Amino acid sequence: MVKQAVKLSPFVVEGAKPATSPYRLWDTKVPQLHVRVQPSGVKTFNVQWDRSTTRSLGKWPAVTVEAARVRARQLLAEVDKEGAPLAVIEKRSNKPGTFGEFIREHYAPHVEATAKAGKATVALINKHFEYLYDEPLTAITRAEFDRFKAKRLRAGTNPATVNRDLDRIKAALSKAVEWELLESNPLLGVKRIKREIEERVRYLSTAEEKALRATLELREARFRQRRLSGNAWRKERGREPLEPITGYADHIMPMTLLALNTGMRRGEITQLTWADVDLKAKRVTVRAGYAKSGKARHIPLNSEAVAVLERWKKQQPEGRLFNLICTAKAWGRLMEKAGLEDFRFHDLRHTFASKLVMAGVDLNTVRELLGHGDIKMTLRYAHLAPEHKAAAVEMLVGGAR
């Protein structure tokens, strides 16, 4: 990427337009100073004090150009004299004593700000490893994790879930090493469980899908009626009525139908912006930055998905399609009303894939639509097309005659 260098001024910073990707404008007066412009329009002053390390100086317009230059020069003077900014030196000397201090004061703020599921990650670390929070940071050893793993497996926890426990805690300790709070990651040599893990494939039957759709419609009608009753109550008391519900009552129905028709993961759906949706071309793009595989993919939209998005755009016309993190409570109530047992939001993805395979779509196409990096993941659905396997085997009979 070409380095853009300009003399920063209020006019230049104010006029910097957001692009589809973040970009930097470097100052010609203080060459290590730059303003970073995010796609959202947020503009942040930063100073780069070595080849790969930057420090935020604050957001425009709360921090002016001249204030950013003053802060940058002060920080660079500290680097010249001390080898690093004084705040960084103090942070290095103030290493956390316990594992809990590290998670709360260092890792949690970082992962919540940088990871799409940061808050969920911290919540799960708190849930499973809080018993170690009063122990020294070095308390999590390989032996300790082996004990934790054995306890989880004895309790009937799925091996895949235990593997995710390992991934989370290993990533946290890797950051501790990167930030020079630990000399080495004690879990670096711990391997994920490699034995055959039974893959759960729960999908909706025709009757179950019909029940789900009917429950969604009833939920919408109930919300609309509740709004009408509420407005009648307000009118009686001389209060301003709320706007009547003309579109969807909330995010649940459009999210559910979108997942059912595209097979996208919940995390992918909640990261979508309208820039990712092309209603004319009938296509949605899952960006590499929030795709689980790390690779972008394009998913065609069928007529129902297009209709859902056109309707939802009237209610949420800008930014992210769904500004939320958790749907667990609303989803649980929906499943109870629909009479569906052991059915998660992620199982809408399984339903999408299963319906495609049962309709005769080849597994490689299904793999591409789901964004699987390995065809082995898609092979979970192969048993749903027995007639194709039977036809293939039957071909051997003719060859033997």
Image (spheres, grey):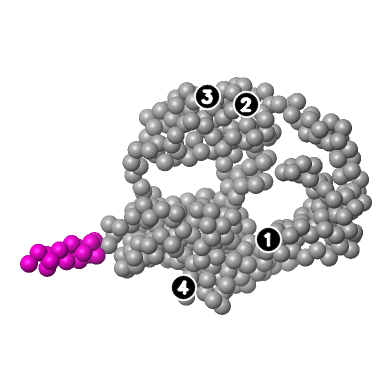
Mark 2 / mark 3, whichever is N-terminal: 3
Q: Residues within 10 Å of mark 1 (few under 14, many from 20)?
A: few
Task: Report the residue marked by disc 1.
Answer: 21
Horizontal and vertical percent for residue 50? Answer: 77, 41
Identified by mark 3, the residue type is Thr
Amino acid type shown at disc 4? Asn
Residue at 71 percent of width and 64 percent of height? 19
* C-alpha separation, residue under disc 1 versus residue under disc 3: 40 Å
Query: Can you tell which of label 1 and label 4 is closer to the viewer?
Result: 1
| SS class, disc 4 | loop
* Outermost residue to the bottom: 280
**Residue behind mark 2:** 183
Residue nearest the observer in this picture, 274 or 212: 274
* Mark 2 surroundings: few (<14), some (14-19) or many (≥20) residues within 10 A: few
Q: Earlier in the sequence, mark 1 or mark 3?
A: 1
Q: Residue 261 at x, y = what percent?
A: 45, 66
Q: Which mark is drawn over residue 302? A: 4
Q: How many neighbours does mark 3 have within 10 angstroms: few (below 14), some (14-19), or many (20 or more)?
A: some
Q: Which of marks 2 and 3 is in front?
A: 2
Check disc 3 and report the residue beneath it: 141
**Label 2, label 4: how many angstroms apart (C-alpha)?**
53 Å
The tag earlier along the polypeptide, 2 or 4, is 2
Residue 204 location (% of width, % of height): 36, 59
Whether the residues at callouts 1 and 3 have beta carbons within 8 Å, the answer is no
Q: In this view, does 52 lie to the left or right of 149?
A: right
Q: Name the mark nearer the viewer: 4 or 3.
A: 3
Task: Give the residues in magenta.
Answer: 386-401
Q: Nearer the viewer, mark 2 or mark 1?
A: 2
Residue 131 seen in the current view: no
The one of 105 and 372 positioned closer to us in this rendering = 372
